[in-house]
Image (spheres, rainbow, N blue to C red):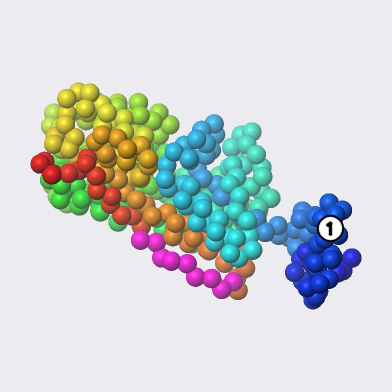
Amino acid sequence: MTTVSHTFSGNGVVNTATQARVRAAAAELGYHPDVVASGLRRSRLGVVGLVLRPAVGAHPEHVGDVDYFPRFAGAAALTCLEHGYALMLVADPTVPGGSVTAYACDGLVITDPVADDPLVASLRASRTPYTLVGADVNDPDDPRVVDIATPMITDRVLEHLAEAGATRVALVTGYDPIEWNTATEQRYRERMREAGAPELVVHAVELDGGEAGAQAADELLALPVRPDGVYCQTSDHARGLVDRFLERGVRVPDDIRVICGSDAERLRNTEPSITSVDLLPEPLGRQAAAALLRQLEPGLDLSVPVPDHGRIVARRSTARPGV
């Protein structure tokens, strides 16, 4: 029994030939170690949970529609695998009727925590390790936060629109109480005040997709003085926004330049193609996974690249007239 245990756990010393005999016998018998029982003995299963806030509720398809989430999850998973852990996408267990699988994980990585996040409160109460990607807007000093550099990205977007010739820039943002929305709006308003420019902000419901983007376009076109540049944070909204502009005879980019805050396939293969921010989620995913693994194993030696936090991918929607 000890030889079998050491063969599958990696503990102790078992020579190569004996390990091969043990594994061959196990395969013939259909045996595999009971990882749950082993985890109970060690108080650890070797599984890290990933909670992607857009996957909450009945709309997990929103995760797959945006480049950011699969790229982030893939990089985080590879970092975990390199250090003997598995990464599992799990639902938020604090949602009524939701799966409680997350509570079986050794720790959780949570993207876009909401204000006064109930999941974070639950993890703190149970002393479960966690890492947040973006801060709880009501608890910005939590030491377990991986910075997503929202103000810096907002600056890059506004500077790109200015270079494209926009002087009256509007912001289309969501309602969810997450850092990406609130910090973007805060930084946008600061920049507009500094420039003595009007603050033109329209809010759009995240899950209403292209229709919400079209409604935002109608609101912007109804203003006494129309904007000549728009920073639209989500890809669904941006596509709906541009489509409505074109329906109403507003030329993009000649009349209004548009940039989206997160890249997606629907922005690349359309006419006009829409300028966006590649948030470069791979190093961010690695950083988040590493931060959690260091909590699980304080002596763990690992290094990961420092995120660059966003790169403008210039496309047709912000090109200067005649370019």
Secondary structure of the residue carrying numbered label 1: helix
The residue furthest left is: 322
Residue 78 is one of the magenta-drawn residues: no
Which amino acid is tagged 1? Ala
Above or below, comparing residue 39 to residue 50 in the picture? below
Where residue 142 appears, as percent x and y from the top left, is: 48, 58
Front in this rendered view, residue 266 or 93: 266
Q: Residue at x 84, y 66 (%)?
A: 21
What count of labels does the image hold?
1
Q: Residue at x 37, y 42 (%)?
A: 264
Return the residue at label 1.
26
Q: Is residue 169 left or right of residue 94?
A: left
Q: Is residue 99 left or right of residue 256?
A: right
Residue 301 is one of the magenta-drawn residues: yes
Magenta residues span 300-308
Q: Is residue 88 left or right of residue 13?
A: left
Give residue 57's quadrant in the image: top right
Q: Is residue 100 left or right of residue 217?
A: right
Where residue 139 appears, as percent x and y from the top left, is: 46, 53
Where residue 36 appears, as percent x and y from the top left, is: 77, 53
Residue 167 can be seen, yes or no: no
Above or below, comparing residue 175 to residue 148 in the picture? above
Q: Residue at x 42, y 42 (%)?
A: 66
Quadrant of the drawing holding the N terminus: bottom right
Residue 266 can be seen, yes or no: yes
Quadrant of the drawing holding the C terminus: top left
